[in-house]
Image (tube, grey):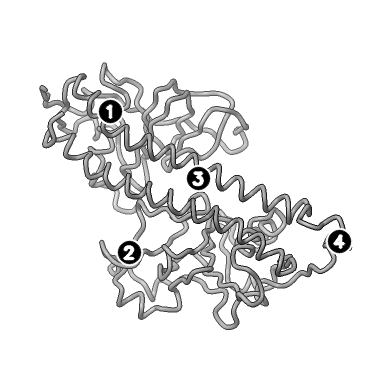
Amino acid sequence: MSWQSCRLGDVLTLKRGHDLPEHSRQEGDVPVVSSSGITGTHNEARATAPGVVTGRYGTIGEVFYLEKDYWPLNTALYVIDFKGNDPRFAAYFLRNVLKGYQSEKAAVPGVDRNVLHEIRVLVPDLQAQRRIVQILGAYDDLIENNRRRMTLLEESARLLYQEWFVHLRFPGHEHVRITDGLPEGWEKATLESICVSGDGIQTGPFGSQLHQSDYADEGVPVVMPKDLVGFRIATSSIARIPEALADQLSRHRMAVGDTVYGRRGDIGRRAFIGKRQEGWFCGTGCLRLRPDPAAINPLYFFDTLGTPETLGIIANRAKGSTMPNLSAGALKTVPIPVAPRALQDHYAEQVGDIRDMIEVLDEQNQKLRTARDLLLPRLMSGEISV
């Protein structure tokens, strides 16, 4: 295997993405890729697959590989010329180069393609590139397979909730009268009344309680709005604080059955706290909702927060024109439909099994990512021969 020392610009050419205002976006089959990944779809493409995209701002080092035509947003850089190199290898190569990249822009981390093009790199020949892709691609293929299974499981749970609690075709519905939109035996309660008294609705710590210098490489995970992805907690870039500090601010630690809810920006992002996340920390920018198990089933509560009606009421209570922001007080009087407890528990039993399967697959994916990311720099440096 031969390696060549060259400029990054000799391996590939990057270009800034294209504008696509919100009012111009349309539903379609074309992925719209931003600095944070696929953020929607459109009906036309601006770039031809295979594609490699990385963010210009924010979290540097995220690189996305696409096998279909796509629209790269202006927050991203994308490869317009692979110069004869393997495209999928280019994705791994760029991820490795950007890992640990130090931006000169202190306020908002960013990358300049002209600067990147001048970085000195080592690149193996095409045959070795393809062997490296085989090794790393096997991990990514397993991750993608698990991700698809998780999506199908989540969809089955969502459809079950819709069938029972939105379309009101729950077991035994044929014998229940509907009055004012609610089946007999159901009621509407305020969010405050079905959460534990005192601190059932708790915002994350303010800046005076938790400083940038408090974060550490190891310790208790701190859940921020950016970590709430697909109704789960993404841990790839999660922050951490020492155990002692988390104990000191123990009111912000989360328990099984809690819901962590993003209160800034894209209102509606949330995740359910299971056994794996017990004791994790509700970070700044989030709310911790703790339902009273005697008043409502926590799993039923979590899914009810996502109904269009409830989500719309919550979103309308967010303040701020630039960035919507929710307060704990604004949530107290949000009305929540409460089904009979036996029906809630029956639903939770079925959904609980689905969530357990999703948790297992998610944990497998985290282990696969860790193993892949350990291999990546060793393969790219030639330390491991292929």
Indicate the secondary structure of the residue bearing disc 4. loop
Q: Indicate whether 241 appears above or below 353.
A: below
Q: Is residue 281 left or right of residue 301?
A: left
Going from the N terminus, do you reach mark 2 or mark 1 first? 1
Mark closest to the chain's N terminus, 4 or 2: 4
Q: CA distance from mark 1 to mark 3?
A: 24 Å
Among the 4 quarters of the image, the one containing residue 243: bottom left
Please give the residue where the numbered disc 4 appears in the rendered image: 176
Where does the image place residue 301, in percent across and percent down from the top left? 63, 65
Q: Mark 2 is on which residue type?
A: Arg
Q: Is residue 178 above or below residue 19?
A: below
Can residue 79 be seen in this snapshot? yes
Using residue 307 as the reference point, say whether residue 212 is left or right of it.
Answer: left
Which residue occupies 61% across, 56% down?
Answer: 350
Distance from Cα at disc 2 to Cα at disc 3: 26 Å
Whether residues under marks 2 and 1 lie with C-beta atoms below 8 angstroms apart, the answer is no
Q: Nearer the viewer, residue 7 or 190?
A: 190
Q: Of helix, strand and loop, which one carries label 3?
A: helix
Q: Nearer the viewer, mark 2 or mark 1?
A: 1
Which residue is rendered at x = 64% and y = 63% of the image? 300
Please identify, in this view, whether the residue under mark 3 or under mark 4 is nearer the observer.
Answer: 4
Amino acid type, label 4? Val
**Where does the image place residue 191, in percent across and percent down from the top left?**
66, 71
The tag on residue 134 is 1
Where is residue 69? Give x, y as percent: 47, 23
Residue located 57% across and 30% down the image: 42
Tell me the number on the disc at residue 240: 2
Compute the Cα span from label 4 to label 1. 58 Å
Dot placed on the residue nearer the N-terminal end, 1 or 3: 1
Q: Which residue is mark 3?
A: 150
Regarding residue 226, the answer to whether it shows in the image is: no
